Amino acid sequence: MVNAAAIVAAAALLGAVPVSAGLYSKNSPVLQLDGKSYDRLIAQSNYTSIVEFYAPWCGHCKNLQPAYEKAAKSLAGLAKVGAVDCDEESNKPFCGSFGVQGFPTLKIVKPGKTPGKPIVEDYNGPRTAKGIVDALVDKIPNYVKKVEDKTLEKWLADSKDTPKAILFTDKGKTSALMKSIAIEFKGAIEVAQIRNTDKEKASKELFGITEFPTLLLLPGGKEAKEGIIYDGELKKEPMVKFLSQAASPNPDPAPPKVKVSKSKEKKKDEKKKEEKKASKDKEEFESASSSHASQDGQTAGATATEEVLEEAPTESPQPEVDTQKPIVLPDPAPLISTIETEAELATECLGERTGTCILVLLPETSDEISQKAITSLSELAHKYKQRQRSIFPFYGVSSANPSSKNLKASLKLGDTTQIIAVNGRRGWWRQASETLSEQDVTEESIENFVDAIRLGEGSKKKIPAGMIPETPEEPSETEEADVTVTLEKPAVTETILVEEVKEEAVEEKADVHDEL
Ligand SMILES: *[C@@H]1O[C@H](CO)[C@@H](O)[C@H](O)[C@H]1NC(C)=O
């Protein structure tokens, strides 16, 4: 019979079984990503990356897998190769925020001017290892300075105490390997290359270089006489080790910032605030939810039990946090849904009879603000759910959704991430902030915005005429015809592939929607 030991054993076994069967195993050279690790490993990186958005059951994804892993192997140390399983429930909004519509979708992510705000572009090249490797190698950021006899002195004098490394080479082009070395030591060692030509003599003579290629390290940054010549293999690992005697390579990912836990005082304050709101909550909740009653079966039950739950402790008491002990994190909040189609937005939030919705209008490329906004709203939704309290729905609206552009245009909003509240039935809308800063997208700030809406505080604007369609729009036949025309445009050899992909995308879209 079942005994405690058997249960423990079974639980241990279950724990060992992978939760989801993604395409890439643990030992794969392909990094498996989700929203959080994407931010840490890809968005914050000084390297260029490629990210595949896939579903494990998709045929083209399975076909791509061997080539993709081969590319990852060739690019090891030069560029990052990652994949996101968009079939994983918790990844869906993340995939949606990239406007992923079909699988596989490949995006190249290059570091931008501001750390953490990369430039994302589509990869539409051949789905072969070579195609991917060539495209990525071409986009590795180049921090290797090309120096000549006449510029050497100035280069040595600039940031003169920073250690320097010089590659003397016959080649004019900078290799991917040298670029990766410069990235590895970005900000810590200045890297240059000097080409070996007949007319460039002074530099070679200054450092006594006679063989090419030669890597020279100047640990103090300027003195020729202290130069150390590298005599190992021209491979990344030993070269990094050699240069590490002058400065440490950048840790990747960057070490996490330490989060300070909230003081007890603050917790108490929040609780008081919470209680004060409770009575007003109910009114707003009832009016806000009445229009959702038909869509949300839980509503009736929640209303009936709310009073009781209000009195009972709504969550287990906060343990005394001992700073010596590791803090056990609560369950992560599931991310809020992303609305991909015009029709869905119309039925959920922009109808004649829809109640209050909070919408995050996402930018074309996901960035720190948009991700943080989604995370904060997800945390908030989760908090309400855990307390079994009802709240109007929160949604992300993908920039791929045509409504998003229209909405931004008719409400005269910028192209960046926007957080708005709308109420179709009552014809009002409100914006959290004209331009969202990092502070505006913390859970606290967003909660304040949501609270103001719940409590009916602050001024609302009238929805411009025509924004709420009188009848939900159906996709017109002409639009469908257009799609077919585009499909026939690509070269004959590619048409089949493109058509297959589009077909799959259409099927998938239906699927993703049902579950979102
Ligand atoms: C990126 O480069 C900067 C120097 O410009 C460095 O401080 C930072 O640690 C690097 N980040 C990573 C993740 O390597």
Image (tube, rainbow, N blue to C red):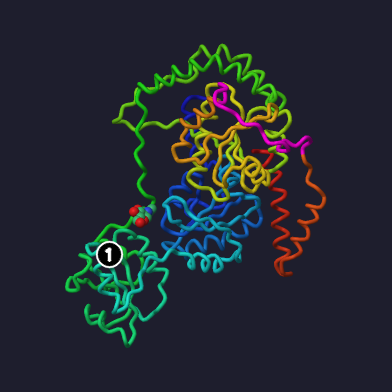
What's the magenta bit mostly, secondary-structure-wise? loop
Q: What stretch is highlighted in magenta?
A: 453-472
Residue 394, above or below 60? above
Q: In which quarter of the image is the N terminus?
A: top right
Residue at the spot x=35%, y=42% of the render? 257
Q: Residue at x 65, y 30 (%)?
A: 428
For disc 1, the neighbor class at 10 Å (few under 14, some 14 to 19, many from 20) is many
Reply yes or no: does residue 463 show up in magenta: yes
User: Disc 1 on helix, strand or loop?
Assistant: helix
Q: In this view, does 513 lie to the left or right of 414?
A: right
> Disc 1 designates what residue?
243
Question: In which quadrant of this rendering is ligand 1 seen?
Answer: bottom left
Residue 21 seen in render? no
Report the amino acid beneath label 1.
Leu
For residue 110, say whether it is visible. Answer: yes
Q: Quadrant of the C terminus?
A: top right
Estimate the x, y position of residue 137 in percent, counting from the top left: 48, 67
Front residue of 458/381: it is 458
**Residue at position x 44%, y 19% from top?**
271
Q: Position of residue 344 (x, y in %)?
A: 70, 38
- Name of the residue lying farthest toward the left: 225
Q: Give the side of residue 225 with respect to residue 463, left or right.
A: left
Query: Percent position (x, y) of residue 38?
Result: 48, 48
